[in-house]
Amino acid sequence: MLLELQSVSREFAMNDGRKLHAVNEVDLAIAPGEALGLVGESGCGKSTLGRLCARALDPTRGKVMFEGRDITRLPPAELRALRRSIQFIYQDPHSALNPRMTILRSVSEPLILHTDLRGARLRAHAAELMEMVGLPAQFLSRYPHELSGGQKQRVCIARAIALKPRLLVLDEPTSALDVSVQAQILGFLKDLQERFQLSYLFISHNLAVIRALCPRVAVMYLGRIVEQGPTEAVFAQPRHPYAQALIDAIPVPEARQPERRIVLQGDIPSPIDLPRGCAFASRCPQSIAGRCDATQPGLYRDGAAREVRCHLYAPA
């Protein structure tokens, strides 16, 4: 595996001494050249998990393995070298670019930090990167405010691929863009992955985007992965009750909307005060009293492809 998370958790200390449990005991793996989608509602821990994968955050517990090495324990010099292999693309391209820097300076920044390219060679390489993302080299002399949202995101992508990384962590990279621009960026990202054999961790709450780009998907709820498997299989027959409700919420393009099969009741538990049992038990229409609310479910596998964290699938 290129990236593997082993029982990774991340907690944040609150001012009153309590802890916010953002990520809880996550096991995840991404193979070379694979695109894995990570879905879930806002606040479930997706972005925190992405930052853990990119080593922008350290886990409270667990290991983050990249190419067989535990990157949570790297010394500063090796961590700097790791930045060449893992890059992050943020949700908002407007705030991801320094408004005082030209596009040339922004795209060249990782090259200046990690290579000996300078002067004309640096500019020529930056121009090649711009061409790769479908932007003219003339844009190098412009500033971010002179570009559209889609163009800015392409600049962010050019900067991210400048060092030829193995893994891109994309945190909602199209959500701040118009729908027509989203389609262009998604098509471009798909072509880019095939061209350079990149691995993607694609974080989104937009299930249609995940279905279009990622052959495999993981569903997250309140810091835990509750189901993962091939995207088409999960969308066609979700197993975890939360995944069922999430898939059922996808709008149907019909003049008359069909009646929803699943309506979740109640509020999401607080990540500061997690329930004793399954975090979804209080909202689950299939909850088993005395079991789901009392004990954490294990992770049950159906062959090598599907995994679900739910008492309903415990072996008899």
Image (spheres, rainbow, N blue to C red):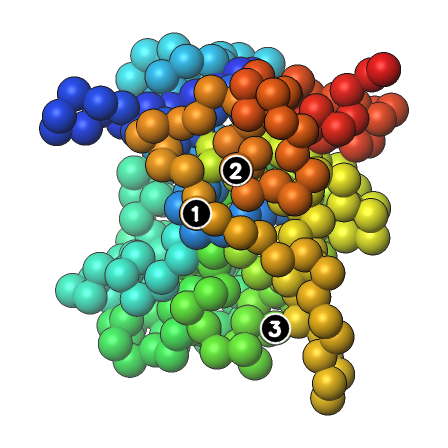
Disc 3 secondary structure class: helix
Residue contact at pointers 2 and 1, CB within 8 angstroms: yes
Q: Which residue is mark 3?
A: 183
Q: Residue at x 75, y 75 (%)?
A: 258
Q: Amino acid at mark 2?
A: Ser
Q: Earlier in the sequence, mark 2 or mark 1?
A: 1
Q: Residue at x 43, y 47 (%)?
A: 267
Residue contact at pointers 1 and 3, CB within 8 angstroms: no
In front: 19, or 197? 19
Q: Give above or below for 150 relative to 199.
A: below
Determine which of the numbered discs, if any, sits on residue 282 in the image. 2
Instruction: Count all numbered tags in the image, as a single digit.
Output: 3
Q: Give above or below for 108 relative to 224.
A: below
Count residues near mark 1 (Cα–Cα under 10 Å), then give few for <14, some for 14-19, many for 20+. few
Disc 1 secondary structure class: loop
Q: Tell which residue pokes out farthest to the left in this image.
A: 15
**Quadrant of the snapshot with the N terminus:** top right
Q: Residue at x 47, y 59 (%)?
A: 173
For residue 299, side relative to residue 141 (left or right): right
Q: Amino acid at mark 1?
A: Asp
* Rendering coords of residue 41 (x, y %): 50, 51
Q: Earlier in the sequence, mark 3 or mark 2?
A: 3
Q: Amino acid at mark 3?
A: Ala
